[in-house]
Image (cartoon, rainbow, N blue to C red):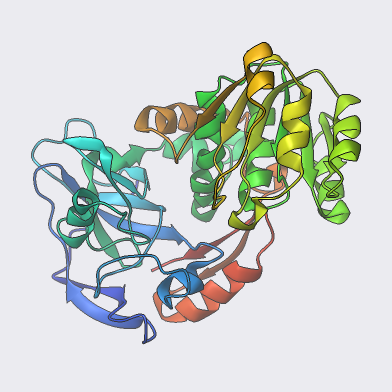
Amino acid sequence: MADYVPLPETHRVLQLTSIAEPLQLKTAPTPQSGPGSVVVRILAASVLSYSGDIYNGQRQYPFPQPFVPGASAIGRVVTVGPDATTLVPSQLVFLDCTIRGRDNPTGAMILSGIIEGFTEASRKLMHGEWRDSTYAEYTKFPLENCIPLDEQRLLGPVDAGGLGYCVEDLLHISRLLVPYGGLDDVGLKPGETIVVAPATGPFGSAAVRVALAMGAGRVIAMGRSETALHRLCALDSRIVTVQITGNEQAETEALKRHGPIDVFFDISPPMAVDSTHLKSVIAVLKHGGRISLMGGVRGDLSFPYAAFMQRNLSMKGTFMFSREQILSFVKLIQSGLLPLGEKGGLSVGGKFGLEKWEEAFEKARVAGTGEVVAIVP
């Protein structure tokens, strides 16, 4: 554990004052911890592939202005509130950007530094106590969103029993956690066969890796790009691929050759509302098959009512993940069963200071599916 560093009076932050203006590097008073909160020194903060489109207004995400943007991060505890019982100064933590209302966890939820949600209760969280996020030297975060990490195991040298990761490698946790929430919700079991579609994007390829680590016997990766699917196959001999061609019958026949299929994990983007893979996979699910929906499809979809009833199919939507799932997932990472870094085919695409935020956003936009980009204050 690193030596304790006291809080300075001021710190540097990236501030968004208006979507019509670029982010600005400013000096602000350093946040102070109180009941239910922790002040953390940011070591590395994630950059989303579409961060530029969020903060220039193209994505039309609602958030307060001005505020400090950000995302999930890795940091070190500096001060804790009086009600903290386990976190201590200098402890390495993962900061989960999914902040929920303590008295209304299902009705009030924001993604810190990204979106304020769509209810008055959610907006209250982001316009008040949790306005500023992690693109700063220090941040104040809810106590329950600071997840302790075993620093010796994760960052320690391999010859001393560690996994040999760098701090930035740990940012992969935030991306891998998303599919873990859905896969855990539908109870993916060791030895089962799962379809992941589309599997070639950042979160789809993460789902492939997580499913393997959870013990899937076979992962059928679907996508449009043959090149991207071929790269996925190199990860593990348990991965097979089926291309999304727009021909529902051809996809169905190709899937049947790898059946029976227990689970279908869908993480379709908004434009996939008419994609043929949704129907082709449902058509081949075995009796009692389960479907996890974690995509961003806009619009309504029809489903084969009779097939669901006759084959006892079940479908569950999952948005992000619970705190219990984070704790379980961190154990999976710390066990080494889900490798990060080069061994897991994952890498750090770049790390940038606060003043280089434009370069960070551009690098994240073009980064590969196994790359993370970090802002390092």
Which residue is most to the bottom? 21
Q: Quadrant of the N terminus?
A: top left
Q: Is residue 133 above or below residue 54?
A: above
Give the residue at x 29% y 69%. Answer: 68
Q: In the displayed structure, does residue 239 sit left or right of residue 97?
A: right
Whether residue 181 is visible to the viewer of this picture, yes or no, is: yes
Q: Quadrant of the C terminus?
A: bottom left
Q: Position of residue 213 (x, y in %)?
A: 65, 28
Q: In the displayed structure, does residue 145 sit left or right of residue 316?
A: left
Whether residue 234 is visible to the viewer of this picture, yes or no, is: no
Q: Is residue 29 above or below residue 317?
A: below
Q: Position of residue 232 (x, y in %)?
A: 79, 45
Give the residue at x 55% y 45%. Answer: 300
Decide which of 100, 68 is in the foreground and name it. Answer: 100
Q: Is residue 26 above or below residue 32?
A: below
Decide which of 65, 340 is in the foreground and name it. Answer: 65
Decide which of 279, 320 is in the foreground and name it. Answer: 279
Q: Position of residue 56 (x, y in %)?
A: 43, 78
Q: Position of residue 85 (x, y in %)?
A: 17, 30
Give the residue at x 60% y 72%. Answer: 363
**Displayed quadrant of residue 131:** bottom left
**Displayed quadrant of residue 368:** bottom right
